[in-house]
Image (tube, rainbow, N blue to C red):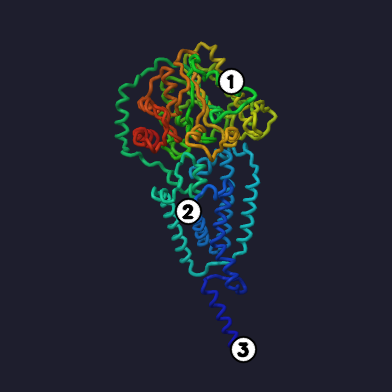
Amino acid sequence: MSKRKSRKNTHSHTKQEMPKVTFGKKATPKLIWFIRNIIPMFLFPIITFYLFEWYTHNPWETMKIRIQFLNIFFFELVMVIFLMVFGKLKAALITETALFMVYGLANYYVLSFRSAPIMPWDIYSIKTAASVSDNFSYALGKETIFVLIGFVILILLEWQTTLTLKGNWKIRIGGFLASLCVLFGFVHMLHQDSTVTRFKLYDKLFTPTVMSKRDGTAVAFLMELEYLTIDKPAHYSVKKAEELLAPYQEDIISKPQSTPNIIVIMNEAFSDLSILGDFETNEDYMPFVHSLMKEGTDNTISGNLNVSVLGGNTANTEFEFLTGNTMAFLPQGSVAYQQYVRGEMPTLVSQLRGYGYKTVAMHPYNSTGWNRNTVYPSFGFSESLFIKDWTNPEKIRKYVSDKACYDKIIEQYEEKEENKPLFVFNVTMQNHSSYSEEFDNFKPDITVAGTNSKVLPNYLSLMKISDKAIEELIGYFSEEDEDTMIVFFGDHQPTDSVAAPVWKLNGKSSSTLTFEEEALRYKVPFFIWANFDINEEANVETSPNFLGNRVLEEAGIPLSDYRSFLADLEKKYPVISSIRVEDATGTSSEITEVQKDLNDYAILQYYYLLDRK
């Protein structure tokens, strides 16, 4: 009996040592152990992947099978890395599932708020995101609730696994390092053109939402890591940049012909959604702006400004306008103010300051948003006004109204030194999202026929308030003797939730848009009005990087060498944005198709932004 008992114990010990795992107090039959551990090891990361994608879309409808396998490989690899770290399958699976449950929910909200998913460079925007986070509605849709329930059930199942790695800790470290090497190799593979071609990955960064749906949120994110840093343009050198500028330096005029007051208003989310399709309202929601944009309006230039952002990243539009640079040469979704502005640089502001202008930046919100408190002085603003500089201002919903902004502009004008020209750059806040909440101080009065949407009428009602405010500002300066120019444009269109009802009324949806229809989402109205004689022009198509040139030219202020280069380039390509390029014939193309023609521009931008001492 004693001998037989000894054999039994030896046999049990041998069974546990072979798979290198522990089973608890009692040995578990092989099949049950296999079902409880090995199947979950491979199956649960796959379920995590599909739940993660289901937050925002049905992966079976948007992703090809081969691309799904790429994502699944990544999720399995993450599980292996956690297994090497913790040594327990339970900890590895639960950590991975919890991580993607939280990340997926955050991505769901970010996509809802700005119509674009989380991207690698959003790490630079955390402070700004936190400052406006209480302005959004965090309600969950039914599908999202089901996804969360699915994650919770999966975690409960993962809790039942028992596999534990045993053996030398050096083996686990080796496994961890090997897994990291595989991960780096996988990411490097995704950055290769051959991989994009082989798997038919969608690599158009200008539509990050489409990219995440077609490639998978995780794979799209990994592909975007390639653009965290900016590569030097082809044939770049400081000497080459100086050679490109040399011909224009000889033509620089030292003194301006005139120095009118210049007031620039970049109006938050201001746009005319009728450009997306027809819809009927009870009244015109921007009658004054529509009247200014008609052909033949006195002393007015107007048209469409083709911006590089949608639903957010406001700072990129002002970056393009103030510097003459373009987001076309920077990673889609990046924020130049936070990633690339690292000190003083020549801008429209610094040029005007050099000609004796008082240069004032105004934004009735937090000074740290998009790093404006450090960027504005670097750009040449002599004074910056933020929310603390408004005393009991009028508010529409939660935000300082456009009228309160314009009253502050008038205050600056009336208090300035006599004969000292004024340049004001005002970024408004009144029309900031979201548009779904109700407020005692905001009663929407625009209705839209054929839709039960709440956000569209709310948004259009805000446009009407903005329209009235700019009419009053122009009315004020039309009576003033000092020459004054007012430049007005939107920074971007609102999120997809506002545009969707318009698409629906016209038989379209975000998933069925053509390249040309997608481009319409990046058009906002602009006008340049003056109380003195300037050229009159309507239906102009331009982009923010060129708009500053028009302002200077109409004001009678000479262009710098860089802006003179841009003036020549604009004759060939009047629209350059991160979304598309339009040539003088009106033909649109992607930036990659004309990269060679624009390489000199890319060289000068790199020089001024990143390499100029």
Viewer-side residue, 28 vs 454: 454
The picture places residue 478, in percent across and down from the top left corner, at 54, 13
* First of labels 1, 2 by sequence position: 2
Q: Residues within 10 Å of mark 1 (few under 14, many from 20)?
A: few
Q: Amino acid at mark 1?
A: Pro
Residue found farthest to the right: 440
Q: Amino acid at mark 2?
A: Arg
Disc 2: which residue? 66
Q: Residues within 10 Å of mark 3 (few under 14, many from 20)?
A: few
Disc 3: which residue? 1
Q: Tell me if I can see residue 467 in this picture.
A: yes
Residue at 52% over, 30% down: 491
Marks 3 and 2 close (CB-CB < 8 Å): no
Numbered mark located on residue 253 in the image: none
Disc 1: which residue? 287
Marks 1 and 2 close (CB-CB < 8 Å): no
The picture places residue 278, in percent across and down from the top left corner, at 57, 28
Mark 1 vs mark 2: give the one in front.
Answer: 2
Mark 1 vs mark 3: give the one in front.
Answer: 1
Residue at 56% over, 84% down: 7
Q: Secondary structure at mark 3?
A: loop
Viewer-side residue, 463 vs 348: 463
